Amino acid sequence: MKMTKRVFSLLFAVAILLSLAAIPAFAAKPTSDGRIIVDNADLFTDPQASELESLAKEQGAKQDCDIIVYTTTDLAGYSAQSYADYCHIKNYNENSVLLLISVAGEAGNRDFHISTHGDCINKLKDSEIDDIKDAILPSLKSGNYYAASKEFINKSVEYMAPHLKWYMLPLAIIIGFVIAMLIMSAIRKKLTTVEMQHGAKNYVRMGSMNVTASRDTYLYSTVTKTAKPKSNSDSSTHSTGGSSFGGSGGKF
Amino acid sequence: MCPRYLTAGLKAALRSYVCNSCGGEIICDENTAATSCPYCDNPVVMMHQLKGSLKPDYVIPFKLDKKAAVEGLKKHLSGKFLLPKIFKDENHLDEVKGVYVPFWLFDADADADIRYRATRTHMWSDSEYNYTETSYFSIYRAGGIGFDHVPVDGSTRMADDLMESVEPFDFSGAVDFQTAYLAGYLADKYDVDAEQSVNRANDRVKESTVDAFRDTVQGYATVTPESTNVRLKNGKTKYALYPVWLLNTTYKDEKYTFAMNGQTGKFVGNLPTDWGKFWGFGALITTIISALIYGGMWLWQLL
């Protein structure tokens, strides 16, 4: 008995150690000095980096969240998603959105990933993240990382700010018009008092109605089941390292 | 001289009579049974139009006078938001006539057997699914129902929809016909016979029979008739004169006819629409509701 207990606790300890080791060692990366443009892959010139930095700070303040651009040459064996999410955990506050650009050496994969955390998960819907991805993909492909990052910062803030789709106003007007016409037609109906009458219920002989047969027969029943609508959030999430994240990425 | 409402677009054959009081010539169409002399205003009753098969069985005497009819129109025009203001302000009555309108009265007994398909629904849900249970029922009803004195307008001169709209008449107010009741009013004899009129009465009786049995099917979410079988036995047919006030006005070269039930005071008549007001207020309401909806969308987005 004692033996098995010991073996289990040993296995448990090993498991914990392994999982700790699985977290990439980002501690050395230069993020603690408050910079939110982390250009490990050296994709930006210095003026570009500082320009992006001030733009991200200024825009991020509007939505009370950190907007981060993180570039790397090495994903250290992780998927772009996990790597981006770990960047969050290690370095930034609760509410943040991060663009990871990964350019490996000569033949490696070129990945990008947008990761959302905290309030930003719900502020950026899946469809909006897809829009941002579509918007920055051409710049990434042509190697214009500066333009892609700028687009990412501007678009994220635009989508995070409360906004309505363009068709919402016409939709509201159409609904308003239909309701208004129903109301006006109901008022106009009062002007029409002449019409053929339905039935002759005013002339029913008092007490003349008799029901001689009355049968209600049960035939059969059917049961239909429909899946409950998923929670009405349009942002899907996944869990990395015990925290929840949103977002998606791709290759370029 | 006949009342103006008689002459509009009618090609009825004309008859001439001599006034018993002043000797003046009275020209009327072939269906007129009572009128007044255009020269001395004495009531004239064409007795031969009310004799034999033309003699009405009953008459409901006028209970409401001309003043009540004019008052009725005023009330009819008030509280109508979309009525053009000019129509109300410059309303000139062209004529107000008390007319005894010939009606056929039909009695009918209906035997019905009707089959319905009905459903009842029950809903519940667990953590993943919503369930809807629909139960189907076959429903059968049979029985009878009787109708008395269903009126059908027997005069082609009176618009059928106008005459049905001033209904109902209360038959308990009817008395045996006497020509004395006609004095001072206009009256027509019927020119649509009972055989032609009975179909309309039967249609209405059938509608009401179906409605009455439908009301006995209770407690279901949906009820649809599957087969409907209504057999009618017509009883006695009676001929009666019912009192109706007719009022005419002209607005923008169009004639508007109103009718008031001379027994109950029920007043009917279609009115023109102020389209400027209709679209103006329509636009206002559209703006308000659209603004509310759009505001609501923003609020929903912000929360």
Image (cartoon, rainbow, N blue to C red):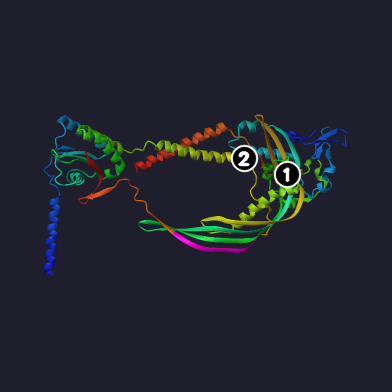
What is the number of the mark on residue B11?
A: none
At a point 50% along the width and 63% down the height, the residue shown is A219
Badge count:
2
Place residue B125 in its image quadrant. Answer: bottom left
Q: Secondary structure at mark 1?
A: loop
Magenta stretch contains residue A201: no
Residue A230 visible in this rendered orientation of the protein? yes
The residue identified by callout 1 is B262
Give the class, few, some or many, for how many residues have Cα within 10 Å of label 2's Cα (few <14, many ≥20): few
Q: Position of residue B261 (x, y in %)?
A: 71, 44
Instruction: Please state the horizontal and vertical placement of residue B298, each as a whole percent of the image.
Output: 37, 39
Q: Are marks 1 and 2 on the same chain?
A: no
Residue that carries the numbered disc 2 in the rendered image: A192
The residue range painted magenta reads A209-222
Q: Is residue B143 left or right of residue A231?
A: right
User: How crowded is the residue under tag 1: few (<14 C-alpha within 10 Å), some, or many (20+)?
Assistant: many
Q: Is residue B37 left or right of residue B135?
A: right
* Mark 1 → mark 2, Cα distance in angstroms: 20 Å
Q: Amino acid at mark 1?
A: Gly
Give coordinates of residue A81: x percent, y percent: 21, 45
